[in-house]
């Protein structure tokens, strides 16, 4: 279980990366609507796994490549925003939980309950 300090650092990394993403000039990243859903940092603060979600699912693979190529810039921005001894190395992961949730909601709403005829 992660400590409170790690949770606070995860939240700060998420906020800092969200603001730094607006200044990335790579068209693969700038043209995609990116949402950082969560961040998981190792206890030694050497690695941070950043889960991202995209509004346009067809651009997700290109945007992930763009995020990986802009990783050095984003890590430098993160280093100046957070005053930590070590700035974590960023690992980008696609988070499809929002898409999965929307699909499940659509399936649930499409079910016919049939309770109107029994009363």
Image (cartoon, rainbow, N blue to C red):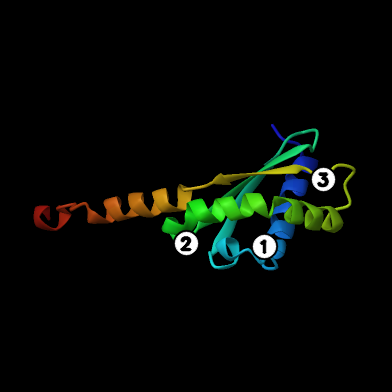
In the rendered structure, the answer to whether residue 100 lies left or right of residue 47 reads left
In the rendered structure, the answer to whether residue 105 lies left or right of residue 60 reads left
> In the displayed structure, would residue 28 be above or below residue 104?
below
Where is mark 3, residue-wise?
Answer: 87
Where is mark 2, residue-wise?
Answer: 55
- Residue at left 54%, top 68%? 31
- Residue at left 16%, top 53%? 115
Residue 103 visible from this viewpoint: yes
Q: Nearer the viewer, residue 48 or 110?
A: 48
- Residue at left 51%, top 54%? 62
> In the displayed structure, would residue 42 be above or below residue 53?
above
Q: Nearer the viewer, residue 69 or 118?
A: 69
- Residue 40 locus on image (x, y percent): 67, 41
Label 1 Cα crowd, 10 Å radius (few <14 / some 14-19 / many 20+): many
Q: Residue furthest left?
A: 117
Where is mark 1, residue-wise?
Answer: 21
Q: Give SS at disc 3.
A: loop
Contact between labelled residues 2 and 3, with CB atoms less than 8 Å apart: no
Q: Give SS at disc 1.
A: helix
Q: Give SS at disc 2.
A: loop
> In the displayed structure, would residue 78 be above or below residue 89?
below
Label 2 Cα crowd, 10 Å radius (few <14 / some 14-19 / many 20+): few
- Residue 33 locus on image (x, y percent): 53, 65
- Residue 79 locus on image (x, y percent): 83, 53
Label 3 Cα crowd, 10 Å radius (few <14 / some 14-19 / many 20+): some
Residue 12 visible from this viewpoint: no
Which quadrant would residue 116 be assigned to in this image?
A: bottom left
- Residue at left 46%, top 53%? 98
Query: Count of labels shown?
Result: 3
């Amino acid at each position: 279980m992660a400590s409170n300090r790690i949770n606070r650092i995860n939240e700060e990394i998420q906020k800092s990366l969200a603001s730094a993403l607006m200044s990335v000039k790579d068209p693969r990243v700038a043209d995609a609507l990116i949402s950082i859903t969560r961040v998981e940092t190792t206890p030694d603060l050497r690695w941070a796994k950043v889960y991202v979600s995209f509004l346009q699912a067809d651009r997700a693979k290109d945007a992930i490549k763009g995020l990986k190529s802009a990783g050095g810039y984003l890590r430098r921005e993160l280093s100046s925003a957070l005053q930590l001894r070590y700035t974590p190395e960023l690992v980008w992961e696609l988070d499809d939980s929002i898409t999965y949730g929307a699909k499940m909601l659509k399936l649930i709403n499409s079910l016919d309950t049939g309770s109107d005829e029994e009363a």
